[in-house]
Image (tube, grey):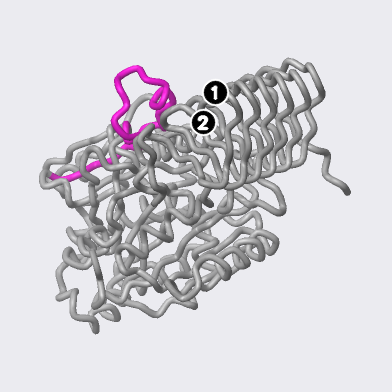
Amino acid sequence: MGLPAMNFQVVVLAGGLSKKLYPLVSKDVPKALLPLGNKPVLSYVLELLEASNLKDIILVAAGEDAALCVGNWVADAVHDRLRVEVAAAPEDSDTADALRSVMHRLTAEDFLVVSGDLVSDVPIGAVAAAHRRQGALVTALLCNRASLGSSEPGSEKIKQQPVSDIIGLDSTHQHLLYMAPGAEIERDLRIRRSLLRAVGNMEIRTDLVDAHLYAFNRLLVQGVLESRPTIKSIKQDLVPYLVRSQLRLGVPSTAVGSPVEDKDARHQPSLPDTEVFAQLLRSSQSGHRITGSPLKCCSYIASKGKLCVRVNSLQAYLDMNREVAGEAIHLTGYEVSAHNNVIHETSSLGWKSTVGPQCMLGEGSTLGEKCSVKKSVVGRHCRIGSNVKIINSVVMNYVTVEDGCTIQNSIICSNVNLQERCSLKDCQVGPGYVVGARLELKGEALAKKEKS
């Protein structure tokens, strides 16, 4: 879906050395460059943006080291297909702070913010078009919780659902009336009657997930970020704040109180002064899309069957590698064999070795004799010995696996050496680690000690 006349800029929040992905990330391989289906995680978002003709991109990495790595990859991989500017935010920046750090670089009337770990086939151009059509302050992409392809009930792929977001919608499902991360709600959700009187009927949904992809009005969001330094997180602070603020603009101020009575007021900043927002609103009316009607917050709900997953945990990383080697193979652009797998033409298989369906074997990798690879991704230039079993696992690049090893439900980072007859189950092995011969490990996270 091309958007030649929309003039959207895009901010991609690429992160850095995510603690949730320990021990996979390292100084040389930040989160954005982790291989997913033998392609960097970040490549999926950039290709999705390119498909919607959204090419003006500011990519924010957490920390100078991560920014340098990502910038080098972008220079080598993207060329002139996209206009990508890489910026570094402080390593400990939360998402709203990362956005603040680049707001001065934004000039378009509207802009998009998307997480660099999003893997999706939802057309971002459709979200941008809905935002512009509605004249919205913010438009959030919402996806169904069970969005990992066409998994059967009870399948392993959907065994770990994200915590429900609490989302309030109007009867058309286009107007976003209430939003809170599910982790903030303990047992009871209490909503003031004044809010219900102001908005009429409101449908509370717990089957939708905020995908962390938003379209914003620049002038209004810039004003909020400048005036509210306590807003740190886009999802937990900024978006719920904007959703509450729209009501002050749209109905008499006496009719709307605080939407939620919550013991924890940390994420309940006071509503903006009406005059402050009115001034920002008047400034934005120089554009063609706002004609004096109250600003509103909107939602774009992805249709069922669309993939929409963030790779922000070890389990999500393992699951999504299997997914892009299987049901979501269309996202990789790879050519699939008649056996429903991807085996690079430069790789080789020894006698009686098999690579099952929904598997990948990368460039220059070799399998010895009598090896078995099932529902796994094996990266580039790996040396796999004989009688090796790899099941439901990810093996990154330049890994050596000696004879007789078994790898099950595990993640093996690049340049690891698994010595003969070792057995790993439910393990994560960090870059460059050596696993000794004949060791049997279960549920371990192994990493080399960093040099001080």
Question: Splitting the image into 4 quarters, where does residue 213 fall?
Answer: bottom left
Q: What is the magenta segment's predominant secondary structure?
A: loop
- Using residue 402 as the reference point, say whether residue 167 is left or right of it: left
The residue located at (60%, 21%) in the rendering is 370
Residue 179 or 315: which is nearer the viewer? Answer: 315
Residue 266: x and y in percent read: 49, 45
Check residue 164 for magenta coloring. Answer: yes
- The three-letter code of the residue at mark 2 reads Ser
Residue hosting label 2: 376
From this view, report whether residue 27 is shown above or below residue 205.
below
Check residue 151 for magenta coloring. Answer: yes
The residue located at (60%, 23%) in the rendering is 371
Q: Element under label 1? A: strand
Residue 235 or 188: which is nearer the viewer? Answer: 235
Residue hosting label 1: 391
Say which quadrant the N terminus sits in: bottom left
Residue contact between numbered discs 2 and 1, judged by CB atoms under 8 Å: yes
Tell me if mark 2 has few (under 14), some (14-19) or many (20+) residues whose alpha carbon lies within 10 angstroms of its own.
Answer: many
